[in-house]
Image: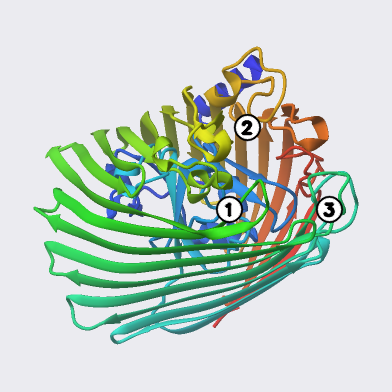
Amino acid sequence: MKKLYYLILFLTFTNFTNLLAKDIPVIVISPGKTLQSKGTVGSDVEVVDSNIISNSGELFIGDILDGNLNGLNYFQQGGYGTVSGIQLRGQPKRYSTVYIDGVKVSDPSTPSNDYYFNNLISGSIDRIEVLKGAQSSLYGSGALAGTIQLFSKKGREGHNKDFNVSSGSFGSQKVDLSFDGKYDNYDYFIGFTNFSTDGESAMRDNSENDGYRSDSLTMNYGYNFNENFRLENYFYYNDSLLEYDSVNVTQNDIEATDDQQAIYTARLVNDNGDLKNTLSYNNTYVLRNVTGNSKKNYYGYRDAINWVSEYNFDLDNRIIFGLDNEFDKAELYNWYTNDAYSESDEAIYSQYFDLQLRPKENTYTTFGLRRDYHTTAEDYYTGRATIAYKLDNNTKLRSNLGTSVRFPSLNSFNHGNRLKIKENLKAETGKSIDIGIDKFLPKNNINFSATTFFLEYKNDIKGWQSHTEGVGGSWALDNSSSKTESYGLELQTDWKPNDFYALALGYTRTESYDGTTCDNPDATGGPGSAKCNDEMNVRVPRHQINFSGSNVLNNNLTQTIKFKYVGERRDYGNTNNNFEDVILSNYFTADYILNYKIFDSYNLNISARNITDQRYSEAYEYKAPGRSFNFMIGRSF
């Protein structure tokens, strides 16, 4: 493995490398909740724009992120529509917050109040920003490893229509239809996506197909009352049905879940030049109807009222401050009796500021502080400091230091309805630092980026402890006394030798320590105390490599080939192996994508995934899809 490590370093530093044009500044929002040039922010942020999304040929957002970003691990428990998640900086998915059009989209009814990417299809998403590192001072609870922001498409000048249809392996069919426009004082977008597949078996113990279908509706409407006042409305709805396999091989594979999710936000913006105020109301509603061996309805609900203000002292100095008020509610089940019990709810009231300064010509800094008051866990403070220093127009040094908090989920506070004194369960707290360099070599047309990072947190809510205050002294969730950490190196090089070729190479080396489950070397069994065969956090590879090469054959035809290597990963076992840890094998995949533009209004995309038909697992006993093909054609008019 050391030889592989040195080989990657050699290839990276010898400029073997999708280039972002240096003459067009990349504008980002996530690092400071305001428009900024990516070249002046100290945070580590990556962008997936509309061109990458539309030309990828991928059907799901998770796959697009997995194939185009460095320092990110994506896992899926089977084929299309099955449980999937994104891990940043070597940490479980619950330590990354996800927003769609400014709305936090985690599910309050899930065990960890985190977000699953399995129903997020690519049809109406225009842009993605991934902000890495501890960001709780801006984004509150859960933003320990980073924040993922997704922005839906908006209305363009005039009145436009887009239609895309695709067909592929496993009986997969996808239809995208959208209408958008911008005229006088208003703009609008309406997008509908239907996806269905016969699927294949999610687990290895059977061969029946696990089908999936999804219908998504995205709408937004903006109206300018005058040059200072604007009203925005966003709505997203998804209805999906997934057939999946029971984990226990002795049970019948008749499981299914019918899920509905609705998100709405109304936003009033007042922009007077130096002072900009935004008042918003957000609502998230989730209903999951599980059938089969376990029949349950899961209900989650969130209201949020937020206010953010931006005051510009001048062009380079500003302050962002605001109030976030979040109210979560869910219907929960008693894990011991399998019965539903009364709804549980909590609220978080937050106040924060972020001061963005340019103290010197080539120096850009940020200082931020946030107070979160949780109705049960009470007060926590988080902060951050960033710096970006430009050695010259082509070289930037950057660093981000931040602290974070993650409050217990509703499920954690009410686990089995056994934790009588909820205040005994504390919030998880962490800190992280990253240091990086971004370098552009104009003579060779090469971009290079290197980032080293360290992250740790404590009070991990994983432990099972006997609570004498509980009902009969029963076992319930508790904070672990151990620390969990991760550190590593992310390298990325992009090289465009001419107008016809582009090469990109990314390498991530991650080391992590799961203090909760690996602190007891004498443990011999059980999910919370099983003998730990590797100290890494589950499903996180030590080594990951992404390579892509694009060739523009003419103005209308482009072909791309992608290679990916993922090293061995530790994973938890299950009831089939007495919950003993396992090691998932490393794997290598290759993809081919062809994009052809016809008559300036038609777009053709042909893709072949996992060409070598690798049989691998991203989760224990679940199999990833084998070789697949997809044909997509679209028209804009």
Residue at image point 13% right, 66% down: 273
Q: Are marks 1 and 2 in contact (CB under 8 Å)?
A: no
Closer to the chain start, of discs 1 and 2, is: 1
Quadrant in which the N terminus appears? top right
118 or 302: nearer the viewer = 302
The relative height of residue 333 versus residue 371 in the rendered view (above or below) is below
Q: Secondary structure at mark 2?
A: loop
Q: Amino acid at mark 2?
A: Val
Residue pointed to by mark 1? 116
The relative height of residue 390 versus residue 535 in the rendered view (above or below) is below
Position in image of residue 573 (x %, y %): 74, 32
The Cα atoms of the two marked residues, 1 and 3, are separated by 20 Å
Residue pointed to by mark 2? 538
Q: Is residue 188 visible?
A: yes
Residue closest to the far left: 313
Q: Is residue 461 visible?
A: no
473 or 127: nearer the viewer = 473
Position in image of residue 336 (x %, y %): 66, 46
Position in image of residue 75 (x %, y %): 65, 44
User: Which dot marks residue 201?
Assistant: 3
The Cα atoms of the two marked residues, 1 and 2, are separated by 17 Å
Closer to the chain start, of discs 1 and 3, is: 1
207 or 365: nearer the viewer = 207
Residue at image point 54% right, 38% down: 92
Closer to the chain start, of discs 3 and 2, is: 3
